[in-house]
Image (cartoon, rainbow, N blue to C red):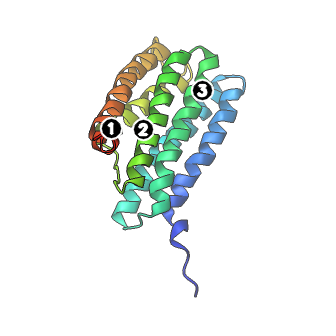
Amino acid sequence: MKRRSKIFNVPNLITGSRFILSGCLMLLLLLEQTTGVAFVAWLVFSIAAGSDWIDGYYARKYKEVTVLGKLMDPLADKVLVTTALIMLIPTDRLPAWIALIILCREIVVTGLRGVASSSGVVVAASKLGKWKSIIQYIALGTLIFPLGLLPIPHLHQIGLAILYVALVMTVWSGADYFYKLRRIFLEDAE
C-alpha cells in the first residue's frame, strides 16, 4: 500500500481549508448583510480563525510539522485577516487607515522573515505576535457579528475599540521583529 505524501497531512489540509474559508468569507461579506448572512459570515470567520490553533496543535502533537505547513500557515492567517479587514471597509465598520497599517506591517514582517530565512535564520512567531493575532481575531469577529442578534449595545464600536488595541500590538510586534532581526540588516553596513 502506497503511503500518503507528508504534504497532504491533517494540519496542512486544515491550513488549506483556511484559504477556502477566506474566499467564502469574502463572498458572504459581499452579499446584502441580513442577520442570517452576517451570522454565517461570522461563523465562517470563527471556524477559520479557530483552525489556526487546531492545525498548529495537531502538527506539534503528532509530529507532522512540514516545510509546506510552516510556509502556508502564516500565509493562510494573513489571507484571512486581510479578507476580513478589506471587506469590512465598505460596511463603515472599519476605517481604511487601520486596515492599511495592519496590512503594511504584515507585508514588512513577511519580508523581514524572508530576508532572515535567506540568511539561514528561522523566525518563529513571537508570543507578542501570537497575542496580536488573537486580539485581531476577536476584534474582527466582533465587527463581523450581526447587530441585534445579541442584546449587546454598541457591539461594533466595542469591536473597533478591540481592533485599536490590536493595532497597537500589531505595530509593537512589527517593531519587535525588526529589532530582533536588526543584526541581519546591519551586518552589511559594518
Q: Amino acid at mark 1?
A: Tyr
For disc 3, the neighbor class at 10 Å (few under 14, some 14 to 19, many from 20) is some
**Distance of label 3 from label 1 (alpha carbons):** 24 Å
SS under mark 1: helix
**Distance of label 2 from label 3 (alpha carbons):** 19 Å
Between discs 3 and 1, the one toward the N terminus = 3
- Identified at 40% across, 23% down, the residue is 167
Q: Which residue is mark 2?
A: 109
Whether residue 94 can be seen here: no
Q: Nearer the viewer, residue 84 or 97?
A: 97
The reply to whether discs 2 and 1 touch (Cβ–Cβ < 8 Å) is yes
Q: Position of residue 104 (x, y in %)?
A: 49, 29
Q: Which residue is mark 3?
A: 86
- Identified at 63% across, 47% down, the residue is 20
**Image side of residue 58 versus residue 107, left or right:** left
Q: Nearer the viewer, residue 168 or 177?
A: 177
Q: Position of residue 11 (x, y in %)?
A: 47, 60
